[in-house]
Image (cartoon, grey):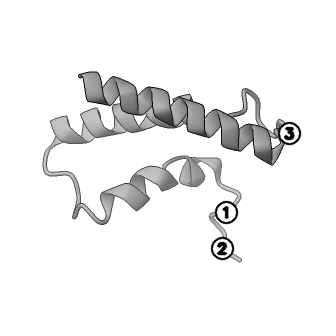
Amino acid sequence: MSCYLNNRLEQDHRGIKARCRPMLGLKSAVSAARYCRCHDELRNFLRCRSRMRQYVPAAEKRWQHMRKTAIALHILATA
């Protein structure tokens, strides 16, 4: 078991690390700031619970995720 699993700070930026590695890093501080800001906002938008450890049934999670994904894709398509 990893000693970092209980560290909330390490877990908070796991998504950013997973996305950044295939892109071979972010080339400038400006692009890193823009990416982190957008990534956090989209992640919070797609999150289906409003509190930590809130129980949300799987069917409800799936429905909310599909609906919110459609909204985000529509916004990106019109931009």
Amino acid beneath label 3? Tyr
Q: CA distance from mark 2 to mark 1?
A: 6 Å
Q: Nearer the viewer, residue 7 or 34?
A: 34
Residue shown at 21% from the left, 52% from the top: 26
Helix, strand or loop at label 1? It is loop
Residue shown at 58% from the left, 53% from the top: 11
Residue at the spot of label 3 = 55
Horizontal side of 55 relative to 25 (left or right) equals right
State whether residue 23 appears in this view. Answer: yes
Nearest to N terminus: mark 2 or mark 3: 2
Q: In this view, which residue lies farthest toward the left?
A: 27
Is residue 22 placed above or below 75 in the rendered structure?
below
Helix, strand or loop at label 2? It is loop
Q: Nearer the viewer, residue 44 or 77?
A: 77
Amino acid beneath label 1? Leu
Residue at the spot of label 2 = 2
Helix, strand or loop at label 3? It is loop
Residue shown at 50% from the left, 36% from the top: 69
Residue at the spot of label 1 = 5
